[in-house]
Image (tube, rainbow, N blue to C red):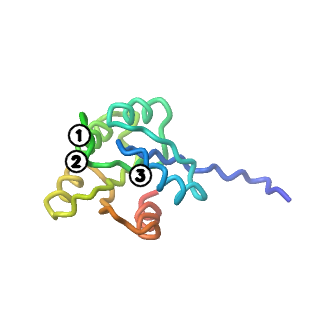
Amino acid sequence: MSSSIEHKVQQLLVVDDEYFNYEILKAALSAKFDVNYADSGTSCLASAIANPPDIILLDVCMPGLDGYDTCRMLKHTPETKNIPIVMVSGLESPLEKQAGFDAGCDAYVVKPFSVPLLLEQINKIV
C-alpha cells in the first residue's frame, strides 16, 4: 500500500579524499539519505552548486582545498550558503573545532565517530 504523500529522500553529500570513508558513511546513512560523493573541495563546490544537497559532510584534511576553505567558500556562495555543513575530522583539539565553526560549519564531529552520534548531529541541523 503506497502513501499518496511522497517523502523526498534527503540528499547528503560526503566530501572526503578517502573513498573508503565515503563507503562507510554510505553504508551507515543510505537508509535515511541519498548519499553522493565528492573527492575534493573543488568537486564539492561544483557539485553543491549544480545539485544542492540537503546537508554536506565535509572532511577537514584534504589535499588542495582543505575542509576549512571549502566550508568558507560554500558559506560565501549564494547558491550554497544555506546548506548545513558537518565537518568530520580526526583533528580533535578545541582550536581545530573552533576553526571549523569560524569557517561556518554547523557541527563538528571527530573521527572515529559512532554512527548514532553522527546521525544525532545531522538531525539537529537538517
Residue at figure coordinates x 38%, y 32% from the top left: 43
Residue found 33% across the figure and 59% down from its top? 107
Name the kind of residue labelled 2 in the image: Ala
Please tell me in which quadrant of the rendered image residue 39 appears: top left
Return the disc, 1 or 2, that comes first in the chain's sequence: 1
User: Residue 76: horizontal and vertical position, in percent?
Assistant: 28, 37
Instruction: Name the element at disc 2.
Output: helix
Left or right of 11? Residue 71 is left
Up-down relation of residue 97 to residue 36 (above or below):
below
Dots 1 and 2: beta carbons under 8 Å? yes
Which numbered marker is on residue 103?
2
- Amino acid beneath label 3: Asn
Which residue in the structure is indicated by mark 3? 21
Looking at the image, which residue sits at the far right?
1
The answer to which quarter of the image holds residue 68 is: top left
Secondary structure, mark 3, is helix
Name the residue rendered at 28%, 56% in the picture. Answer: 89
Q: Residues within 10 Å of mark 1 (few under 14, many from 20)?
A: some
Locate residue 50 relative to residue 75 in the image: left or right. right
Q: Residues within 10 Å of mark 2 (few under 14, many from 20)?
A: some
* Position of residue 87 measured from the top left corner of the image (x, y, whole percent): 32, 53
Near-viewer residue (101 or 28): 28
The mark found on residue 69 in the picture is 1
Looking at the image, which residue is at 23% across and 40% down?
A: 69
Kind of residue at badge 1 = Asp
